[in-house]
Image (cartoon, rainbow, N blue to C red):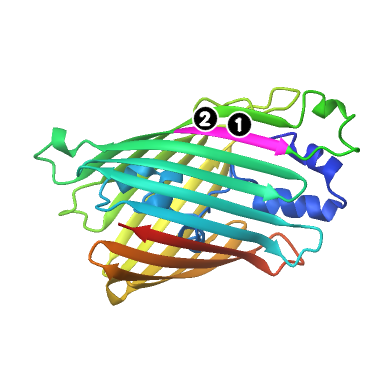
Amino acid sequence: MKNLMKIIIKLLPSFATVLALTAGAQGAFVDPTWSARVAGLGGAYTALSDDAAGIFYNPAGGVGMMRKEILLSYSKLLTGLETVNISLGQVAYAHPIGKHSVLGIGWGRFQAVDLYREDTVLVSYAQSLKPLFASYSGDLSLGISAKFLTRSFTMTDRTSNDPVFSGGGRKSAAAIDLHVFSVPEPVLLPGLSLGLTARSVNSPNIGLQADENLPMEIVGGILYRWNNFAFPIDVASRKGKLNPSFGAEMNLMNGAMSFRMGSDINQISTGLGISHDLTQNFKIAFEYAFLMPLTVEGTTGSHRATFGIKF
């Protein structure tokens, strides 16, 4: 979004706040760390994506889910900065269809209060190809996501007469994402899985006055599981810039408690998760993550919390 910084400058009172907003939070269209679990893993989730949050990253990774799941997430970003009030909110629902497909529905919001907002409404579907290759010991799944994106700026006396907002302060567009997930040869390569996602393959126009096409982003991921540990690594490419991320997750007490850490080039993170089976078919979970940016000064970090239900 090449014109976003210029527009935000018209709205925000200080250049320091502009840097905090554009470098630290980036907005819902490009920020890959929606849920607390994803954030705790540094955003490396393309080859994992085994819960409802995965519908925003790689829904093909959720084909093996056995129960329906809903996640509610809230994030407070860059706390401690006096002129910044930025948050993320997310609702994600995954609905398995038989043993080989899964449907996902989600909504996400990024908001700088009284300044700027982005909304993402998503519908995804993923299908395993294993029934077509019964002799293959691994698994290969394909997925597709349709996203309805809306960005809106709060209109003020300062901006209402600006040519940038001559057509209003709101723009919507549709984007298509494509996904691949693979568990190659679990006998020869135990614990290994691979993921690939292409976001916004149609490069939708999200500009207000002038055309401003959202660039396609390619994310490749690899995951290695060893005993009760998981080690995901992602590399994202957007407009020729590479952003690697990695994480580590340790599960204890048969998965009832988890500890995480992760990092990308902009921040480091840590997190934990607790889950409990209320009945045989009803499980609740709470996830928390703390992120400390490496490029923004004067902040006490970002916080993310997620509450989940499996049924």
Disc 1, disc 2: CB below 8 Å?
A: yes
Query: If you read the primary sequence from the N terminus, does the residue marked by circle 1 or circle 2 appear first?
Result: 2
Check the image and report above or below for 253 versus 174.
Answer: below
> At which x and y percent is residue 235?
48, 48
121 part of magenta stretch: no
Locate residue 135: give its quadrant.
top left
Local secondary structure at mark 2? strand
Question: Label 1: few (<14), some or many (≥20) within 10 Å?
Answer: many
Q: Is residue 94 visible?
A: yes
Check the image and report above or below for 124 versus 273.
Answer: above
On residue 111, the disc is none
Residue receiving disc 2: 175
Residue receiving disc 1: 214
Question: Label 2: few (<14), some or many (≥20) within 10 Å?
Answer: many
Residue type, label 2 = Ala
Give the residue at x 34% y 38%. Answer: 180
Give the residue at x 52% y 69%. Answer: 270
Q: Nearer the viewer, mark 1 or mark 2?
A: 2
> At which x and y percent is residue 86?
69, 55
Q: Nearer the viewer, residue 245 or 12?
A: 12
Give the residue at x 46% y 43%. Answer: 106
> At which x and y percent is residue 233?
43, 55
Please tell me whether the stretch drawn in magenta is mainly helix, strand or loop: strand
- Residue range corresponding to the magenta coloring: 146-152
Q: Residue furthest bottom?
A: 253
Residue type, label 1 = Leu
Q: Is residue 57 visible?
A: no
